[in-house]
Amino acid sequence: MRDHTLGAIPWPMRILVGLMVYRTAMATLYGQGTARFSGEEIGAFRADIWENINELLVASKRNMMGSDNDKCFWVLGKENPSEADTVLFGFVVGAVISDA
């Protein structure tokens, strides 16, 4: 991501600036407590998040559709999409598409 984000900066400076940004970001994450989790804990959090999203979508689909499996459904079970649908779509696309 460093080469993509800092692509306009010459190569030697890009490395130094990238390291400074990385250290600052890691110090912030550590101060917030996020960087203090182990790899196993992060994996468990990730699995829990995806399971909860799946449960929400399965319940919403079950409530909206009945027997018609081809009918479009929305996260909150309403007739029209809401902000929750937009946020969930952005989250899923960002997680699936991102190379980071």
Image: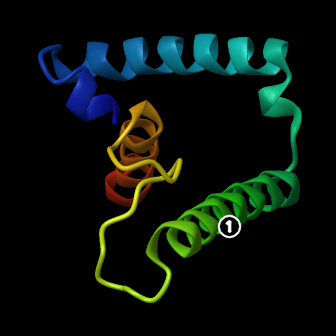
User: Looking at the picture, how far across and down is residue 13, in whole percent?
Assistant: 29, 13
For this view, does 13 lie left or right of residue 74?
left
Q: Residue furthest left?
A: 8
Q: Residue at x 49, y 20 (%)?
A: 19
Compared to residue 44, the image places residue 22 above or below, namely: above
Q: Nearer the viewer, residue 76 or 57?
A: 76
Compared to residue 87, the image places residue 93 above or below, namely: below
Q: Nearer the viewer, residue 5 or 49?
A: 49
**Which residue is denoted by mark 1 in the rendering?**
55
For this view, does 79 lie left or right of residue 7?
right
Q: Based on the displayed image, in which of its 4 quarters is residue 40 positioned?
A: bottom right
The number of discs equals: 1
Q: Secondary structure at mark 1?
A: helix
User: Looking at the picture, how far across and down is residue 59, in whole percent?
Assistant: 63, 68
Q: Nearer the viewer, residue 65 or 23?
A: 65
Q: Quadrant of the N terminus?
A: top left
Q: Residue at x 25, y 32 (%)?
A: 3
Compared to residue 72, the image places residue 37 above or below, namely: above
Q: Residue at x 50, y 81 (%)?
A: 66
User: Looking at the picture, how far across and down is residue 39, in whole percent?
Assistant: 80, 55
Compared to residue 7, the image places residue 66 above or below, namely: below
Q: Residue at x 29, y 19 (%)?
A: 14
Colour pattern: rainbow
